[in-house]
C-alpha cells in the first residue's frame, strides 16, 4: 500500500491520465504507451481489510483519470504506471454478497483463480452504483435512475451533500466571527509556524501584538518573496496591506548571505533590483512592530513560510491555505482561489514573478469573503469541482478534444457560482473518452440513464464484448435475475454457510481412557492454533473430545499432524464431523490452498502469547523473501493469538520457509506450519460468523441429510453460469486492464450481509498482476 500524489502545496504533477481511445483501435495504435506493465499493490494482508464505498470510488477515479487531473493515489492501494492502463472495467454482481462467494466457492472457479486482491465491503445501499462514480454529482436522471452526463451549470449542492464538505466538517454551516478562524496553538505547531520555545526559533523577534483578539480586531494581509542564499530561503521583499487593501509596506530587503538563486520566475527579484538596497531584515522587523496594532490578526497564504523567513513570531494568524479546507491535507493554490472565489486573475504569466502586494491583498480578501459569507456559502462553490473543471479545460484545449455542453467553463465572471461542475464520468467525456454503463442501468442516445431489469446476463455479455473494448471506463452489471432478490434468500441459506464453516473448524479426537487428562489434550492441540471451544463427548463407549478452532489452518494442521499420535496416554484418531455438507471438505481444502490469494502465504502456530510482534519480526527476518507478517488478534480483547501468517515474495520462498520453520523452536516453543487457507478478510468474516450465533457447534454427526431445495439448486447453476460469463468477458480484455469485481452485499429484512471486492490488472497470462 502507500499514497502517491500532490503534496500540501498542490504542485502540478504532470500528465498521468490514460490516452483517449478511438474506435479505430485506440491504445493499440499507440504501442509505445504500453511498454511498461501496470501493477497493483495493496495493503490488504491482515484482518483490517474492509474498504468503504468512498475508497473504491477513489481507486476508480485515480485509475481512470490519473494525476493530470490532480487525482491522488488512494491511501489503501497503489497503481504503478497508471498512465499505461489500457482501461478500467468494473463488474457489479447485484444481489450478491461475501456470503454467496464462499457458499458457492467451488462454483466461482474463475474468480478465485484470477483475482489475487480481495477486500470486504460494507453492506450495499440504494445508491451503491452512484457511489462508484461520485455520490452527490449533479447528473441527468430519469425514473430516479442515476445518469451519466452532467447538465448542471451553476447548480448548488443539496444540504445533505454539504455535510461531507471538509469546510463544513471543520467549521459547521453557520456564520461566525473572525476569531473562529484564527489558528489554534495546536494548528500553529502542526503547520510549522514559529512559536516561542520551538526548535530553530531562537532569536526570533516577537511582534508584541499581545492583546486579546475580538471579532472586530483589524486584519492585515502579509506576503513575502524569498531568494535562495547560502543559508537557505531568505526574505528579499515584504508587503503588508490593511483591511481596506491599502499598501502599508512594500520593501525590498537585502539578505545577509550571498544569494545563489534569485528565483526570478517566482520572486520577481533580480540582482539589479537589490544592488542599491540598504534595508536589512532587522529594519523590516522594526517597521512591522511599529505598524501592527497590539490586537492585529495577520492573514496570508501558507503564512508560516513568510514568518519563518521574517524570523518573527505572531500569535494570531488566519491562513487561507488552511481556511479553504480540503480532504487529506491537500491545499488550494492562491491563484486558483483568487479566480474561483474572487473572480480575479493574479500571478499572470505575462508578469515577471509574483507581486507580493497583489498576493497579500488576495489572501486578505479571501479571508474577508469567508468571514462575511460563512462556511455554507463557501462550500456551495464546490471548489473541488471548479478545480477539476479548470484542469479539464486546460487539458482538453491542449488535446483539442470535444467538450460536452455540461462541462464547459463559462466566460469569466466575478460570480464564481457560474462555473460548471463536472462529475467523475464527465471528466472522461471531456477528453473524448466515452464511459460505458451496461446492465440494470444503461444510457440511451439522449444521454439519459434508463432502468432495464429484463435484460439477461447473456445479452449484457454480448453488448459488453462489443462496447467495452472501445471504452477506457466501463461498468458492467450482472444479476441473478429479476425473480431472485435479496429479500428472498433460500431458506436457511446463512445458517447452512455458518454450519459448514463450523464443521470445517471442528475436529473430533479420541478415544481416550476414562481418567484422561483434558488439560494435556488442550495443550497439545492448542499448539496447532487458537481454540474456540473444547467439549468432552461422553455419549460414546470411550470419551472423545470435540475441539472447535478459530482458524481453518489450525483444524487442518491438527488432522494432518496429530492423527494416529499418542496424546494423554492414548493413541488417537483425529477426524472432522461427517455430514452431507462436509463430504467435499477435502476438495475445498485443496482449492483453498491453490487459491491465488493464498499464493506465497503460510500459517505458523505454536507461538508463545508473550512474544510481541517485534520479537516475531526479528525471529522470522532470517527467512528469505519474507514480505509481511500478520499476527491475528482477538477482535474483542485485542490480544494476539498463538499463531501468525507469513507472506513471501514468491511461492518457492514460502515452500522453503515451511521446511525451515517445522524444524524451528522460537523462544523454546516448537513451531508447526502449513500453507495458508484463509486470507485476512476471510479470517475476520469467520470470526464474526462464529461470534454472531449462540449455537453450540460440533454436534452434527447425527444430522440428517437434507437434499438441496429447488431454489438452491437453481441458484448454484446460475452462479456457475455467471462465473463462465465473467470468464468470457475477462478474456476479451486487453493486457493492462484494471478489472474490479464487486459483490455489493445485501441489506434486507433478513439482515445485513457484507459485500466483497476482487481486483487485479490483467497481464499477458490472463491472470492479475500485483
Image: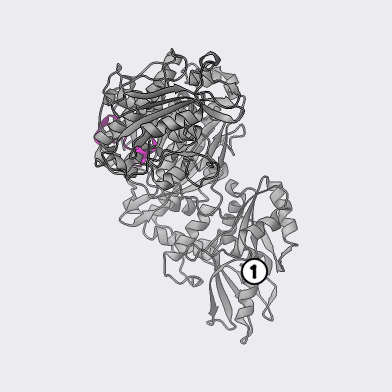
Res 427 seen here: no
Q: Nearer the viewer, residue 272 or 425?
A: 272
Image position, residue 510 (x, y; %): 62, 77
Res 183 seen here: yes
Image position, residue 18 (x, y; %): 50, 25
Q: Which of the colour schemes (rainbow, by chain, secondary structure, one colour) is used?
A: one colour
SS at mark 1? loop
Using the image, determine if residue 526 lies above or below residue 398: below
Residue at position x 67%, y 80% in the image: 568
- Quarter of the C terminus within the rendering: top right
Residue 444 belongs to magenta span: no
Image position, residue 194 (x, y; %): 48, 40
In the image, 506: left or right of 561? left
In the image, 718: left or right of 135? right
Residue at position x 45%, y 27% in the image: 224
* Segment colored magenta: 126-145
Residue at position x 33%, y 34% in the image: 441
Image position, residue 546 (x, y; %): 55, 74
- Quarter of the N terminus within the rendering: top right
Using the image, determine if residue 570 lies above or below residue 761: below
Residue 128 belongs to magenta span: yes
> How many labels were placed on the picture?
1
Task: Determine the main secondary structure of the stretch shown in magenta.
Answer: loop
Q: Residues within 10 Å of mark 1 (few under 14, many from 20)?
A: many
Using the image, determine if residue 391 lies above or below residue 692: above
Q: Which residue is mark 1?
A: 527
Q: Nearer the viewer, residue 278 or 77?
A: 278
Amino acid at each position: 500500500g502507500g499514497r502517491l500524489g500532490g503534496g500540501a502545496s498542490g504542485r502540478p504533477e504532470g500528465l498521468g491520465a490514460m490516452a483517449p481511445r478511438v474506435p479505430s483501435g485506440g491504445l493499440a495504435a499507440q504501442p509505445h504507451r504500453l511498454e511498461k506493465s501496470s501493477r497493483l499493490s495493496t495493503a490488504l494482508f491482515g484482518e483490517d481489510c474492509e474498504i468503504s464505498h468512498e475508497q473504491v470510488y477513489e481507486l476508480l477515479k485515480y485509475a481512470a483519470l490519473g494525476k493530470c487531473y490532480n487525482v491522488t493515489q488512494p491511501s489503501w492501494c497503489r497503481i504503478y504506471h497508471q498512465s499505461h492502463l489500457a482501461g478500467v472495467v468494473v463488474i457489479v454482481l447485484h444481489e450478491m454478497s461475501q456470503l454467496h462467494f464462499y457458499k458457492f466457492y467451488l462454483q466461482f472457479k474463475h474468480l478465485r483463480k484470477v483475482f489475487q486482491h480481495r477486500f470486504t465491503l460494507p453492506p450495499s445501499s440504494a445508491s451503491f452504483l452512484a457511489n462508484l462514480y461520485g455520490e452527490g454529482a449533479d447528473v441527468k436522471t430519469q425514473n430516479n435512475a442515476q445518469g451519466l452526463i452532467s447538465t448542471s451549470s451553476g447548480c448548488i449542492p443539496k444540504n445533505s451533500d454539504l455535510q461531507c464538505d471538509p469546510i463544513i466538517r471543520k467549521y459547521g454551516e453557520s456564520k461566525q466571527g473572525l476569531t473562529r478562524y484564527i489558528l489554534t496553538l495546536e494548528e500553529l505547531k502542526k503547520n510549522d509556524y514559529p512559536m516561542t520555545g520551538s526548535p530553530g526559533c531562537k532569536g526570533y523577534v516577537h511582534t508584541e501584538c499581545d492583546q486579546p483578539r475580538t471579532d472586530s480586531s483589524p486584519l492585515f494581509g502579509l506576503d513575502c518573496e524569498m531568494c535562495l542564499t547560502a543559508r537557505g530561503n531568505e526574505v528579499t521583499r515584504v508587503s503588508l496591506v490593511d483591511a481596506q487593501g491599502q499598501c502599508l509596506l512594500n520593501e525590498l530587503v537585502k539578505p545577509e548571505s550571498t544569494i545563489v538563486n534569485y528565483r526570478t520566475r517566482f520572486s520577481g527579484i533580480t540582482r539589479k533590483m537589490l544592488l542599491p538596497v540598504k534595508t536589512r531584515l532587522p529594519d523590516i522587523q522594526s517597521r512591522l512592530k511599529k505598524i501592527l496594532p497590539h490586537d492585529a490578526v495577520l492573514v496570508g497564504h501558507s503564512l508560516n513560510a513568510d514568518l519563518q523567513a521574517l524570523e518573527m513570531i505572531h500569535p494570531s494568524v488566519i491562513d487561507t491555505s488552511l481556511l479553504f479546507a480540503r480532504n487529506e491535507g491537500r491545499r488550494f493554490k492562491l491563484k486558483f482561489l483568487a479566480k474561483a472565489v474572487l473572480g480575479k486573475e493574479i500571478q499572470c504569466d505575462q508578469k515577471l514573478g509574483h507581486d507580493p502586494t497583489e498576493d497579500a491583498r488576495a489572501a486578505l480578501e479571501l479571508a474577508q469573503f469567508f468571514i462575511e459569507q460563512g462556511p455554507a456559502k463557501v462550500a456551495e462553490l464546490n471548489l473541488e469541482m471548479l478545480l477539476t473543471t479548470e484542469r479539464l479545460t486546460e487539458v482538453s484545449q491542449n488535446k483539442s478534444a470535444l467538450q460536452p455542453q455540461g462541462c464547459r467553463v463559462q466566460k469569466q465572471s466575478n460570480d464564481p457560482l457560474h462555473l460548471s461542475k463536472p462529475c467523475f464520468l464527465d471528466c472522461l467525456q471531456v477528453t473524448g473518452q466515452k464511459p460505458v454503463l451496461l446492465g440494470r442501468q444503461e444510457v440511451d442516445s439522449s444521454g439519459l440513464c434508463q432502468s432495464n431489469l429484463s435484460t439477461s446476463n447473456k445479452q449484457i455479455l454480448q453488448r459488453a464484448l462489443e462496447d467495452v473494448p472501445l471504452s477506457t471506463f466501463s461498468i458492467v452489471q450482472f444479476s441473478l435475475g429479476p425473480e431472485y432478490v435479496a429479500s428472498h434468500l433460500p431458506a436457511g441459506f446463512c445458517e447452512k454457510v455458518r454450519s459448514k464453516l463450523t464443521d470445517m473448524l471442528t475436529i473430533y479426537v479420541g478415544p481416550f481412557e476414562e481418567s484422561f487428562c483434558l488439560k494435556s489434550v488442550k495443550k497439545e492441540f492448542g499448539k496447532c492454533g487458537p481454540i474456540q471451544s473444547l467439549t468432552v463427548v461422553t455419549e460414546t463407549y470411550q470419551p472423545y473430545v470435540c475441539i472447535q478452532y478459530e482458524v481453518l489452518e489450525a483444524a487442518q494442521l491438527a488432522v494432518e499432524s496429530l492423527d494416529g499420535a499418542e496424546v494423554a496416554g492414548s493413541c488417537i484418531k483425529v477426524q472432522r464431523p461427517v455430514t452431507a455438507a462436509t463430504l467435499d471438505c477435502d476438495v475445498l481444502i485443496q482449492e483453498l490452498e491453490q487459491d491465488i490469494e493464498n499464493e506465497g502465504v503460510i500459517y505458523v502456530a505454536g507461538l508463545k502469547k508473550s512474544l510481541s510482534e517485534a520479537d516475531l519480526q526479528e525471529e522470522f527476518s532470517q527467512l528469505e523473501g519474507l514480505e509481511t507478517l500478520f499476527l491475528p488478534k482477538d477482535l474483542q480483547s485485542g490480544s494476539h493469538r498463538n499463531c501468525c501468517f507469513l507472506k513471501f515474495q514468491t511461492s518457492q520462498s514460502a515452500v522453503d520457509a515451511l521446511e525451515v520453520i517445522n524444524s524451528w523452536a522460537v523462544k523454546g516453543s516448537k513451531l508447526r506450519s502449513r500453507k495458508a487457507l484463509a486470507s485476512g478478510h476471510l479470517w475476520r468474516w469467520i470470526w464474526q460468523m462464529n461470534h454472531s450465533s449462540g449455537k453450540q457447534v460440533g454436534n452434527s454427526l447425527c444430522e440428517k441429510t437434507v437434499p438441496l431445495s429447488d431454489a438452491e439448486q437453481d441458484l448454484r447453476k446460475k452462479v456457475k453460469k455467471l462465473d463462465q460469463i465473467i470468464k468470457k468477458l475477462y478474456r476479451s480484455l486487453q493486457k493492462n486492464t484494471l478489472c474490479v469485481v464487486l459483490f455489493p452485499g445485501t441489506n434486507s429484512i433478513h439482515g445485513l450481509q457484507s459485500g466483497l471486492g476482487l481486483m487485479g490488472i490483467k497481464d499477458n497470462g490472463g491472470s492479475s498482476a500485483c
